[in-house]
Image (spheres, rainbow, N blue to C red):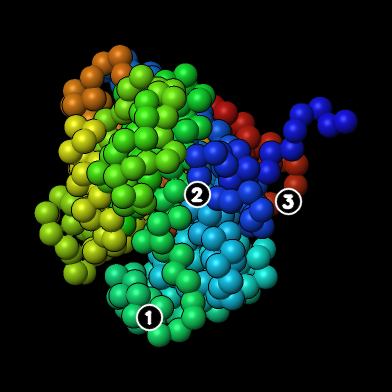
Amino acid sequence: MPFRPRYTGLIERYRDRLPIDDDVRIISLGEGNTPLIRLNNIPGELTRSVDIYVKYEGLNPTGSFKDRGMTMAVTKAVEEGSRAVICASTGNTSASAAAYAARAGITAFVLIPEGKIAMGKLAQAMMHGSIVLQIRGNFDVGMRLVKEVAGEAPVTIVNSINPFRLQGQKTAAFEIIEELGSAPDFHCLPVGNAGNITAHWIGYCEYSSAGGDHVTEACLFCNSSCSYAGGALAGSRPTMVGYQASGSAPFLRGAMVDDPETVATAIRIGHPQSWEQAWKVKEESGGWFDECTDEEILAAQKLLSEKEGIFCEPASAISVAGMLRDVEAGKIPEGSTIVCTLTGHGLKDPDTAIAQCPEAVLTVDAELGAIKDAILQKMSL
Ligand code: F0G
């Protein structure tokens, strides 16, 4: 007898709140159930007292939150008889699609912007045997092409416009509520296509609702009657806050951005696919969008790594960069409980990490004296 039941992924875990039939073959890699880590050291550096947790989605099987949506999207694609999936991606979706397609025994086609995806993500797509189409264009161009080609070829789109993706991703909110015993006061996320902020809001709404009425207008999954809401497990919903990189901030500009640019390549997106839904999330939750510069993003990534031992990729760190600024500015009030989603693992983008630490490595002779001198010199600092 095992000491505890084996965790077999979020579809099994939340079957009753997901659009999944009993006899379906589930394509899973054990995604979900990620740690909600309370920050110990960074809050002490703030002038206001708040309780900060990070939901470390980088610990999903392929190193990002995309796996939550991908287990649903690929399970459904296989159920419907699809032999191939396709996506445009800034890197993480392609890594996840490639892995879940491999698991299912089907083909993944991934369109990525040439030279603009982090090396770890490219390595994943290649190793999992997907067909990588590197395009001379950015994510938004790739997304347009994927939509066009899916109309002409027998492939299932697994970008977040696939409604099953957000259904899977909403489970992150369920886990947070179960672990905290209630919803946080604020939930801060990076925003690219705005699928993830929408998915979280759907999850929070479903868990805080008493019945199957239309729990949020941000959800396009079922038409006004929600089958998955009920129980009113949480008494409240958080205020949702979305951060964008300054060079790729259509929600701040109030219009699409044609040439997005940022060091956080995961969110180098100018034409968000969940545009309307994300505005609903802001409105219904009383939240806001804000932007961070590349410098702020990288500083937050380093801070989390150095002060808390948590290594996330640049795009993820924007949730902490923006949150810290909003706490100090009083927009997030003293006494709040805050959750920041760290969407992807730091190992995804080793180049950006190494470039930030030019003096982190000492080269010394391979002999005792040199090592001892180096240690004593460092310890006296
Ligand atoms: N953080 C990371 C690490 C991401 O990879 C993404 C999106 C986001 C945040 C933004 O999430 O689009 O739901 O608002 N990455 C997509 C991709 C676009 O292709 O991997 P969103």
Question: Given the image, on which type of amino acid does mark 1 rest?
Answer: Gly
Quick check: 20 left or right of 224?
right
Quick check: 237 left or right of 168?
left
Q: Which mark is residue 19?
A: 2
Q: Earlier in the sequence, mark 2 or mark 1?
A: 2
Q: Residue at x 67, y 70 (%)?
A: 105
Specify the quadrant that holds the N terminus: top right
Comparing labels 3 and 1, the label whose residue is closer to the camera: 1
Comparing labels 3 and 2, the label whose residue is closer to the camera: 2
Kindly give the residue lying farthest to the bottom in the view shown: 152
Dot 1: what SS?
Answer: loop
Q: Residue at x 38, y 80 (%)?
A: 151
Dot 3: what SS?
Answer: loop
Q: Which mark is residue 366?
A: 3
Badge 2 vs badge 1, beta-carbon distance below 8 Å: no
Question: Given the image, on which type of amino acid does mark 3 rest?
Answer: Ala
The vertical placement of 374 against 327, above or below, is: below
Dot 2: what SS?
Answer: loop
Q: Residue at x 47, y 19 (%)?
A: 181
User: To which residue does mark 1 refer?
Assistant: 151
Q: Earlier in the sequence, mark 3 or mark 2?
A: 2
- The foreground one among 313 and 232 is 232
- The foreground one among 363 and 8 is 8
Question: Given the image, on which type of amino acid does mark 2 rest?
Answer: Pro
Residue 248: x %, y % from top left: 23, 58
- The foreground one among 212 and 15 is 212
The reply to whether residue 191 is visible in this rendering is no
The vertical placement of 70 against 108, above or below, is: above
- Quarter assignment of residue 352: bottom left
Kindly give the residue lying farthest to the right in the view shown: 1
The reply to whether residue 82 is visible in this rendering is yes
